[in-house]
Image (cartoon, rainbow, N blue to C red):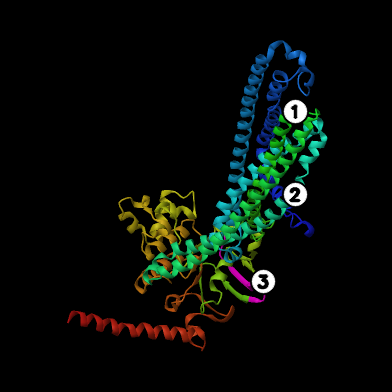
Amino acid sequence: MKVAVNPLFRRIPWQRLKIAAMELRPFLEPVRRELLIAFACSLGAVSMVVARPWPIKMVFDYALLPDGRVKWVFPFAVLKGYGAMGVVTISCALLLAISLLWGAFTYTQRYLVAGAGQRVTFTLRRRLFAHLQRLSLSYHRRQHIGDLMLRTTGDANMLRDMIVDAVVILATDGLVLLTMVAVMFYMDWRLTMISLAVLPLLAVAVFRISHDLRGAVRKQRKREGRMASLVGEMLQSIAVIQVFGREEFEDDKFAGSNRSNLRQGLRTVKLEAQLERVSEFIIALGTGTVLWFGVGRVLSGILTPGDLLVFTAYLGGMYRPLRRISRVTGRIAKATACAERVFSVLRADERIKVRRDAIEPPRFKGRVTFKHVTFAYRRGQDVLRDVNFTLTPGKTVAVVGPNGAGKSTLCAMLPRLFDPDEGTITIDGEKINRCTLDGLREQIGMVMQQPLLFSGTIAENIAYGKPDATDDEIRAAAVLADVHEFVDSLPAGYETVIGERGDTLSGGQRQKISIARAMVKNPSILILDEPTAALDASSAARLGRTLARVASGVTTLRVGHRLAELRESDLIVVLEDGVVSQMGTHDELMARPGWYREVYQLQLAADVSVVPELTASAEGGHG
């Protein structure tokens, strides 16, 4: 839910807090009962705080002063028979009872609110994680992975501070403040007005410093997101860094980011300390002023020492909530900045749109048509322009072209990872946006250039394409992908646990497992996006035979750079600068000049020239 904000109020911290609270409201609904009980406990705790000074007043006014000056407490007739020590005993008992009740109310309140905060954070983080998975690839390609990780974890945790502090401190201490001010007005309104005179100064200080603090926190979290991105990039590229000896370069790059974050962190700490220092000074000024005037009113007989004791206790009780509120304003400013970062992700509306009347598609026959397809990541910079071709059921269409021509983007459009800006894509004559996403993607298998595997067993990785796959289906997919013999030779077989991203396996083994993962769901359409690009020639040749077998009888869209691997395709589409420049079979394309014939001949010449060199090298080694 997006809330419109009047520009005149954009600088007001409490307006931002209100907006954050409104966006949190759907997440607070499930814990409303706990919060209501906590609020009731807050009322009990407030009443105990208000009652706390009165037993001490009884001691001063009933046990230590003449009878004629007693007021503001129980009628003297109720206690006069107990004597001075009896009044002291009753006062001590009341103090103990008040303390026990306050402790019970406070414990219950804090436990309920903290538990509610944990559950809200759990729900919010889960919603954020689910939302991130469903945002389009266009959104993710504009973001830093580390920053999104920080928003999902650290920023979501910071929101808990806002929930707990806003509910507990602002509500409870606000009630304490109002109640005490009311009682103080009843006791001596002039002295109360003097007490309240410092509030405007405190409000101005809190407003100005917390506004700067919120901006500083927002910049700090952004820098922390960049640091997290650098760490993630380093861990993913650790082999490259070590091979090229770039550890010191990466150290310096991280040190620069870390230094910038340190400066911003120190600024944040400085503002927090400044807020606390100014608040303490203003509160001390108010306390000293009240004491000076209060003693004069006691000496003139208007108030008793017990009255002044209660009044100063209330004064401390009134300034204590103000002190906590001013202190917690900094934390709320931090949490509000984090809330803005979290909800900016939740407000992102870049999900693939699913029509309300979307249908569950029947089993595809496999006729795929791209008709006048145009797409751009940024307006005015087309990646694909007016692309037209058709995949015949059971046939293989190869898409080739120079780097950056839009081949992978074209493949990603078929399972609707992207939607075309113009034109349509149909399967068996039905527009793919008329199908449910799950129904569409369930019938499309995809093997990518980089085989992405997950920590877990080999069986779990193959079954990732079909979670309810049986052991026989997993084994059949592995046989089809020519990886069964390798897996079966392992001590734990299909229950062998592989490392993160499958790093314990070779590139060819990882790719064959990803092929099995694609084939386990028996897809009607198969997408092979440069599956041999990261392999050496020998591994690519072996994998090529596997791919030819799995693609047999399945409508296949294949992208590749080794043109010799694609020459048997039923149709070859050449993309240059996002435009189809050539189309036909291998023989047809070789019969006319163009990108395909030129590149094929270059690759063929390069492959032929390697053979004598290898032979000579081998002979020299034997000699």
Q: How far across and how far down the image is residue 607, in percent?
A: 36, 82
Residue 383, picture quadrant: bottom right
Q: Is residue 417 above or below residue 313?
A: below
Q: Which residue is mark 1?
A: 307
Amino acid at pointer 3: Gly
Q: Are marks 3 and 2 in contact (CB under 8 Å)?
A: no
Mark seen at residue 596: none
Q: Position of residue 373 (x, y in %)?
A: 64, 73
Q: Nearer the viewer, residue 293 or 490?
A: 293
Front one among 99 and 388: 99
User: Would you call the spot at circle 3 few (<14 residues within 10 Å), some (14-19), or many (20 or more)?
Assistant: some
Callout 2 touching callout 1 (CB < 8 Å): no
Q: Which residues are magenta?
A: 364-381
Q: Nearer the viewer, residue 211 or 436?
A: 211
Q: Which of disc 1 and disc 2 is earlier in sequence? A: 2
Residue linked to disc 3: 423
Report, in whole angstroms, how far the alpha carbon at label 3 lies from the one at label 2: 63 Å
Which label lies toward us, 2 or 1? Answer: 1
Earlier in the chain: of badge 3 and badge 2, it is 2
Q: In the image, what residue occupies the spot 61% across and 50% down?
A: 127
Q: Which residue extends farthest left?
A: 623
* Left or right: 351 in relation to 449: right
- Residue type at numbered disc 1: Asp
Report helix, strand or loop for mark 2: helix
Determine crowd level at label 2: few under 14, some 14-19, many 20+ residues with C-alpha closer than 10 A: few
Place of residue 317 in the rendered image (x, y in percent of width and height, measured from the top left): 69, 35
Answer with mark 1 or mark 3, whichever residue precedes in sequence. 1
Give the residue at mark 2: 201
Does the stretch in magenta take in 379? yes
Question: Can residue 208 be seen here?
Answer: yes
**Mark 1 vs 3: CB contact within 8 A:** no
